[in-house]
Image (cartoon, rainbow, N blue to C red):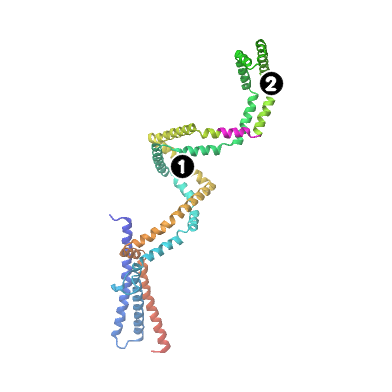
Amino acid sequence: MINAGNTIDAEKAAAIRKVRRTATGILGFLTLVFAVSFAISEPPTWLLLVRAMAEAGMVGGLADWFAVEALFRHPLGLPIPHTALLPNNQKRAAGNIARFIDEYFLAPEQLLRQLQRANPALKAANWLEKPDNAAALSRTLSQLLHDILHSQLRGGIGPAPTKYLRELMTRIVDTPTLSRQITELLKGSVHSQLLNDILLQVRDVLDENRDTVMAVVQDRSRWWVATSVDKRITEVLVDGVLSIIDELSNPKSELRQDFEKSITILIDRFQETGKIAENIDQGFKAFTDSPKFARSLEQVITAVLHEVDKGLVEQPDRVADLMARALQDFAQTVQQSDDLQDQLNARFAKGFEAILKEMRPAIVDYIAESIAGWDSDQLVARMESEVGRDLQFIRINGAVLGALVGGALFLLTHFAFGA
């Protein structure tokens, strides 16, 4: 079975042979006419005109035949200098062709203009909107994601993801905002039941540990103070503290209101001087830099990736379907938004320009090396296949033009100078 490429090459070769036979036939016809014109010893003027046209057509046809042949091979196999130009200059021609393509076809500004006109974002969205295309792409992406996750999980998460997430968390934490929010939270807690609960807890601790408090006071008393006095003073102090706590626990008491104002002013002062923000930064840094945080984060990432990979393995069709619908929704969003198209096209152009910058020298070298590495006969065959038909028309044009010029010169000299 002949494939499409071979069919095209066969058609080109047949077309070249047809035009070559036509050009050769015209040259042979002119040669025959020129020879037959000598059959009459005293030819009339019209026959001399025909002879002159045939002679000039022969010269033009032969000259163009020689030029066309010399481009590809030695005419008649003779090693005439400056013939077989393409095979003899194959390496230089390869470099020139590569530079020509590089200069006129791989210029970034030219390609980017064409890319801008093409609007690849819209074309991709139109293609992606079709269910079959979205399904095919989603299956490919699902398999690719599974391969990546499987490889990553098998080799271990490593420090890179945890480092990235730590840096991400550091960037997204807004310390000033968080400081203001904590300030408001603390100020709110001053007026809440939380303060009452704390005060009551402190009261209970003091009341339940009177003996301990008394022992501490006695240990630190002067040697000359009597034990009974120490005990009495301690009881008075504890009772006084408990009374103060009871007063503070009453939201309507004047002492409680003064206490709340003082605490509120203190909290505001901490916030204004940056103490709260400083403590947040120090605490957050100490937390994120700790090995425990890194281990916990790695465990969470690993667990999430395992679940995702498990879903890809156990329910591939469901995952692919969800991904396909998401792709179609995104495609419809792109179709409806000119701004999004412009953004995607700009990103695509930027990526394309970066890739072209890296690949352009390699493309030029590949073209030059490929052409230079072809067999000479193969190179001639390929070039003839592409341009040979037009070159054979040059032979035809040369013969016809030569005949017309020869006839014109004959008429000019005949009428100007006589027979």
Give the side of residue 328 with respect to residue 397, left or right: right
Residue type beneath disc 2? Arg
Query: Callout 2: 10 Å neighbours few (<14), some, many (20+)?
Result: some
Where residue 148 appears, as percent x and y from the top left, is 40, 40
Residue 364 inside the magenta-drawn segment: no
Observer-nearest of 178 and 139: 178
Observer-nearest of 168 and 217: 217
- Is 340 situated above or below 406? above
Query: Callout 1: 10 Å neighbours few (<14), some, many (20+)?
Result: many
Task: Answer with the quarter of the image where residue 299 lies.
Answer: top left
Instruction: Identify the residue under disc 2.
Output: 256
Q: Secondary structure at mark 1?
A: helix
Q: Which residues are magenta?
A: 273-283
Q: Secondary structure at mark 2?
A: helix
Furthest-front residue in this view? 224
Q: Nearer the viewer, mark 1 or mark 2?
A: 2
Magenta stretch, main secondary structure class = helix
Where residue 116 appears, as percent x and y from the top left, is 50, 54
Where residue 353 appears, as percent x and y from the top left, is 48, 53
Q: Are marks 1 and 2 in contact (CB under 8 Å)?
A: no
User: Residue 328 — which label?
Assistant: 1
Earlier sequence position, callout 1 versus callout 2: 2
Give the side of residue 385 with respect to residue 234, left or right: left
Furthest-top residue in this view? 228
